[in-house]
Image (cartoon, rainbow, N blue to C red):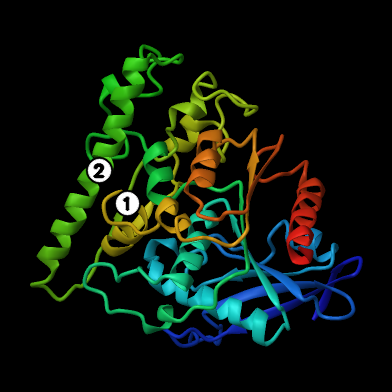
Amino acid sequence: MGEAGSGCLREFVGSPSPLVGRAGAGGHPCQGVYHRPVGEPPKTAFIAAHYDVDFSEHYMAEHLAARGYGFLGWNTRFRGNGAYFLLDHALAEIGVGVRWLRERAGAEQVVLLGNSGGGSLMAAYQSQAVAPTITPVAGMRPVPAIEDLPPGDLFIALAAHAGRPEVLTAWMDPSVTDETDALSVDPSLDPFDRDNGPPYSAEFQARYRAAQRARNERITDWALGRLDELKETRARDALFTVHRTWADLRMIDPTIEPSDRKPNRCYLGDPRRANYGVFGIAALCTLRSWLSMWSLRTSQCTAARHLARVTVPSLVIHATADEGVHDVDARAIVGALAAPDKTVERVRDGHYLLGSRPEVADMIDSWVRARLTS
């Protein structure tokens, strides 16, 4: 255990998974860093996890530890490995982290923090913990460990997306005509062709959104068909690439769903450059990880279905200058939450809250304390 700053202790946590063993080199499949204040172990602790982003040193950890809480930045074995993501497996490994907080760290109240893409993931966790509904992806075996997950006591959605298949579809470039060719393009749908905009007409926007959904469905059709073909072979799955996924019209045209965000900007900077680069969500998938995480038709990573079973007190914090999460997303999350006690807060900042982290920590602290003392 070491110090991370004034009065904050950090402890590395490595835990077994109910699904796979330790790596040959010795690493545990479930890993994270527990942040807490010096002194008595805190009775309230947060856990934050993501589909594939490393949350072990999450940007809110030290801020909330400084306010008297524990914070477990938690990773499943899919950290940095989203190409192989399976929802039921990830939920089982998040359960390992929640149990560690309750049984080893001494937490009496656990707050599920769903940040960014982790919003729908943590909603799925709480949903499965209170009313199991998750089923295995095509051809996979059931995971008994997800039938008895310890639920959280509070839920927070922080700069959270509405779900993995929704965010991918909203961002994907529908002008791709050949999934094997990153440069293939239908000029009539090209968002970077000046003849199309910006500004983009209502007619173009409607065609564009419909074509995005159609592209997602085509990939799903192909993935399901390919899995059927593999049944008669030695292979059980296959890798494939998804090109050009930084093309949400809102990234380019700020007049669409206006907010405090900067124009012509995505999380990787200039959308045109990012769209034709090699770093993008869903860039590499297996047939099953596509069906588990990204498909509009088959994915169980949509937040709304899970939020409908989240009844614990819930807080939604929306960053009004977010480059990829919009007010419509925050309103959808609030509308889908079943919690009788739900609060919405807004902060004028970008997705990573670079200028407002202490402010947001105070916001969370105030909200949590009010519920722990009521």
Q: Residue at x 49, y 73 (%)?
A: 77
Which SS class for mark 2? Answer: loop
- The residue that label 2 is drawn on is 179
* Frontmost residue, 144 versus 28: 144
Q: Which percent across, then down, holds residue 321?
A: 65, 33
What amino acid is at disc 1?
Answer: Thr
Vertical position of residue 167 compared to residue 84: above or below: above
Quadrant where the C terminus sits is bottom right
Q: Is residue 52 visible?
A: no
What amino acid is at disc 2?
Answer: Glu
* Frontmost residue, 337 versus 157: 337
Q: Residue at x 30, y 52 (%)?
A: 295
Residue 241 disc label: 1
* Frontmost residue, 345 versus 206: 345
Q: Residue at x 28, y 67 (%)?
A: 137
Judged left or right of residue 28, residue 174 is left
Quadrant where the N terminus sits is bottom right
For the residues labelled 1 and 2, say whether their Cβ atoms are less than 8 Å apart.
Answer: yes
Tell me which corner region of the image, top left, top right, bottom left or bottom right, holds residue 41: bottom right
Which residue in the rendered view is the most extreme toward the left? 232
